Each structure stands twice: as structure tokens, then as C-alpha cells.
Image: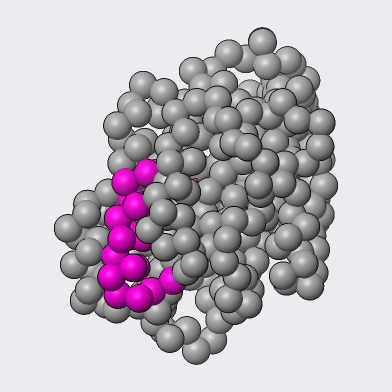
Amino acid sequence: MRILVTGAGGQLGRELVRMAPAGAELVARDRQALDVGDRTAVLEGLRALRPAVVVNAAAYTAVDKAESDPEAASRGNADGPGFLAEGCREVGARLVHVSTDFVFDGATSRPYRPDDPPAPLGVYGATKLEGERRVLREIPNRSLIVRTAWVYSSHGRNFVLTMIRLMRERGTVRVVSDQVGTPTSARELAIALWDLMAANATGVHHWTDAGVASWYDLAEAVRRLGQTRGLVPSNARVVPISTSEYPTPAHRPACSVLDKSSTWSILGRTSRHWLDTLDEVLAECAHA
Ligand SMILES: NC(=O)c1ccc[n+]([C@@H]2O[C@H](COP(=O)([O-])OP(=O)(O)OC[C@H]3O[C@@H](n4cnc5c(N)ncnc54)[C@H](OP(=O)(O)O)[C@@H]3O)[C@@H](O)[C@H]2O)c1
């Protein structure tokens, strides 16, 4: 079965390629090879390849930059999935698309369920929500949308690698402690997506690692576990601050914990705890 992975150069894309099941005829396309915001390239590419499944790991993920460049965010996050869905409808392929906790406003007292009303706070979340809607409009019965959160891996641009770099450069880092969510290993997400595909799952579902953390908790875990792995200096310190002390162009949800129960029920298993998966990724960083 031929499976096309778009955005194959990103954190998730790389892990999807790495964790692909034996026997899958994988075609991996990074941004240079296939720009999902280019409708002609997408439609012609799908007609030529005729994949059975397209997994879209491409996205415009610069949350703060999106506020001043909504056209670019919309091109990657709304047009791209829309064009892929259109092409999938034409060639009869299924589409697996990845979305975000940022479709919610974070004013919740319990984990968000897939059918909770979205209310994005910024351009990134709004464009990702529009991408979801375009996919569901084109191919409601042959699409799977998986929302995730706080994704990191041993490669690429992410909070964990930034913390390691800042602890090395500055020793002390100040990190917000009043935004909570769940750190998610890109590899665990990739494995879950392959398993959901094998189960022929459709609809909108959530996936993150298990547990709840603030950005401060995550930074503190990077410090503690990173020190035991020799990644972080012994004098590193993490200081908790409030969101108001660290203003950013984009507003972020205060609480974006996702309810994963529908995914867990399809897979017949739960997520692993974020501390365990973080330690695995740090081990990988230490051996790189
Ligand atoms: N990272 C997170 O914390 C997070 C949280 C929630 C949800 N998600 C979602 O998870 C998915 C995977 O994210 P990720 O963490 O793997 O992000 P990532 O590392 O930024 O990867 C995204 C990839 O998409 C590529 N890309 C951007 N625009 C493209 C286009 N028009 N055509 C083709 N490729 C394009 C990027 O290329 P360039 O690098 O060249 O731009 C990059 O390689 C995305 O749907 C994202 O919205 C991520």
C-alpha cells in the first residue's frame, strides 16, 4: 500500500518515516519536494503517485510569527490540507491530518474532548482550525484528524532543545508556570498515527503523551533528567514566572490538556507518561 507523507522534514514527518510499518510503500516529501500550499503541485503529485493514504505532517508552526504573517500561516495550515483533501477525494485516497490544541482557548476546567467547541486565540490556531474544516468538508468519511500538543523530538525546533541550549548558554532560564498542557514525543505521536491508520480510524481524535505539566515543569524535568545524561550543566536553574512576565505576540491557551479517551479506546491502549518519553528523547540527544 502506497503512503505519501508530506512535511517529511519536520519533527513529526521524520518520525513517521522512521516508524513506518514494514511493508508500507512509503513516499516521503519534504517542503522542497512538495509544497502543500501549491494546489497544482498537490493535485498533479497525487494524480501521479495515486497513494492509498496521505499523511499530512506539513504545517506552518511558527506560532508567534503567524500573528504578523497570517497569509503564510493560512497557506500552510488551511490551503495545504484543503488541497490535499481535494486531491485525496479525486484519487480515492484517505487523508490523515494533524491539528493542534491551539484550536481551543484554554479556559477549561477539564481536558478538552474532540467535540468541544473550538475558540482559537490566535492566527496559528485559527488557520489550523480552518484546515480541519476544509478536510472535513471535502472528505468527511475518509479523513482522520488528530489534534496534538507540545510536540518535541531530538531534532528540529522545539522547547526541549531550546531549554538545553539556554541552560548551557545562560545557566538560568525563566519559564512560565501558569500554562499547562502535555508534552508529546513526536515519535509516540507517529506510532499512534500508524496504529490509528491500521485501525482505519476516521473522525476527529486527540493524542498526546499522558500526564499534565506546565512549561516550567517541563523545563525543570529537562534540567533534572538532562543533568543525569550530561546534557545540561550542574549549575543550571529554572525560575518559574507568570505569562504576564513573558509577553509574546500570540496569546496561548492557559490549559490545553486534551482528552485522549476516544483514541485510547480505538487503540486499546493508553499513552505513555510524558516524563518517560522525555527521558528517552534526552537519551537520544545524549547519543547524537
Ligand atoms: N510542534 C508543536 O508543538 C505542535 C503542537 C501541536 C500540534 N502540532 C502539529 O503537529 C504537526 C507536526 O508539527 P511538527 O512539530 O512536526 O512541526 P515542524 O517540525 O515545524 O514541521 C513542519 C514541517 O512542515 C513543513 N512545511 C511548512 N510549510 C509547508 C508547505 N507549505 N508545504 C510542505 N511542507 C511545509 C516545514 O518545513 P520548513 O521547516 O521548511 O518550514 C516543516 O518541515 C503539525 O500539523 C502541527 O501543526 C505541532
Residue at 68 percent across and 16 percent down: it is 243
Q: Is residue 147 left or right of residue 23?
A: right
Residue at 81 percent across and 37 percent down: it is 110
Q: Is residue 254 left or right of residue 93?
A: right
Q: Total number of numbered labels?
A: 0
Segment colored magenta: 78-94
**Which image quarter is the N terminus in?**
bottom left
222 and 120: which one is in front? 120
Looking at the picture, how far across and down is residue 248, in whole percent? 54, 18
33 and 181: which one is in front? 181
In the image, is residue 22 above or below residue 159?
below
**107 is within the stretch colored magenta:** no
Looking at the picture, how far across and down is residue 120, in whole percent? 55, 30
In the image, is residue 192 above or below residue 154?
below
Residue 256 picture quarter = top right
Whether residue 142 is visible, yes or no, is yes
Q: Is residue 248 left or right of residue 253?
A: left
**In the current view of this chain or complex, which residue is farthest to the top?**
245
- Name the main secondary structure of what is drawn in magenta: helix
Whether residue 162 is visible, yes or no, is no
In the image, is residue 268 above or below residue 280?
below
Residue at 41 percent across and 23 percent down: it is 67
**Which image quarter is the C terminus in?**
bottom right
Residue at 36 percent across and 21 percent down: it is 68
Residue 89 picture quarter = bottom left
Looking at the picture, how far across and down is residue 233, in whole percent? 73, 36
Residue 166 picture quarter = top right
Looking at the picture, how far across and down is residue 284, in whole percent? 65, 59
**80 is within the stretch colored magenta:** yes
